[in-house]
Amino acid sequence: MNVIWRTILVILQARRRVRRGRVLAPTEIGRVRLTTLPTDLDILRHMNNGRYLSLFDLGRWDLLIRTGLFDEMKNRGWYAVVSSQTVTFRKSLQLWQRFDVESRMIGHDDKAIFLEHRAVVDGEVYARVIVRARMLRRSGGTVSHEELFAAVGQPEGIPAIDEWIHDWSAASVLPPTKAPAPSTWN
């Protein structure tokens, strides 16, 4: 079973939850229950570090659908892209281990939205990722926060982003796509 099948399953489950009235406010935490499968493992027989990021995408799908943001994005021809992310690993997930992907919007700056995803076993964090995402138009260009919040509402109750996240975001940025970005090593 590849991640595409899990993605389809999560999307269908999220849609079913919405039909049953289990929607989420933008500040609420979404949870998706998963199991570590043989295809998730690396040579050391624990979950591959890259697979965490793929599985955290499932949490984003659930969150987008259950908050209603996905339908608004689809209707307006918008889509989200990850512009940067940082991940921290604490414990390894083992074969057949059940865990939850917990996802929440943690804030925004003038250009991006920040989300946090966690791999959690029995209430204990095993891994965490901070994601910086931007909204783009299928017709080209960036969706401003003013336009985004006019369409979906300004989320209330979102805590201020930790200063280290602002520092990381600024330090990890690459030049814009139309600017030169030569690969030179110092």
Image (cartoon, rainbow, N blue to C red):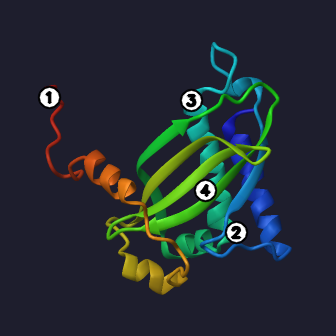
User: What is the secondary structure assignment of the residue under circle 4?
Assistant: helix
Mark 1 surroundings within 10 Å by alpha-carbon count, few (fewer than 14), some (14 through 19), many (20 or more): few
Residue 60: which disc?
4
Instruction: Point out the frontmost of discs 4 and 3.
Output: 3
The one nearer the camera, 173 or 2, is 173
Mark 2 surroundings within 10 Å by alpha-carbon count, few (fewer than 14), some (14 through 19), many (20 or more): many
Q: CA distance from mark 3 to mark 1?
A: 27 Å
- Using residue 20 as the reference point, say whether residue 43 is left or right of it: left
Q: Amino acid at mark 2?
A: Arg
Q: CA distance from mark 4 to mark 1?
A: 34 Å
Does label 4 or label 3 sit earlier along the sequence? 3
Q: CA distance from mark 4 to mark 3?
A: 18 Å
Q: Residue 117 at what x, y percent from top left?
A: 59, 51
User: What is the secondary structure assignment of the residue under circle 3?
Assistant: helix
User: What is the secondary structure assignment of the residue under circle 1?
Assistant: loop
In contact (CB < 8 Å): disc 2 and disc 4? no
Does label 2 or label 3 sit earlier along the sequence? 3
Mark 3 surroundings within 10 Å by alpha-carbon count, few (fewer than 14), some (14 through 19), many (20 or more): some
Residue 76: which disc?
none
Q: CA distance from mark 2 to mark 1?
A: 43 Å
Q: Quadrant of the N terminus?
A: top right
Q: Which residue is mark 1?
A: 184
Does label 3 or label 1 sit earlier along the sequence? 3
User: What is the secondary structure assignment of the residue under circle 2?
Assistant: helix
**Point 59% across, 72% down: residue:** 69
Residue 49: which disc?
3
In contact (CB < 8 Å): disc 2 and disc 3? no
Q: Residue 83 at what x, y percent from top left?
A: 38, 51
Q: Which residue is mark 2?
A: 66
Q: Residue 153 at what x, y percent from top left?
A: 53, 84
**Point 34% across, 65% down: residue:** 140
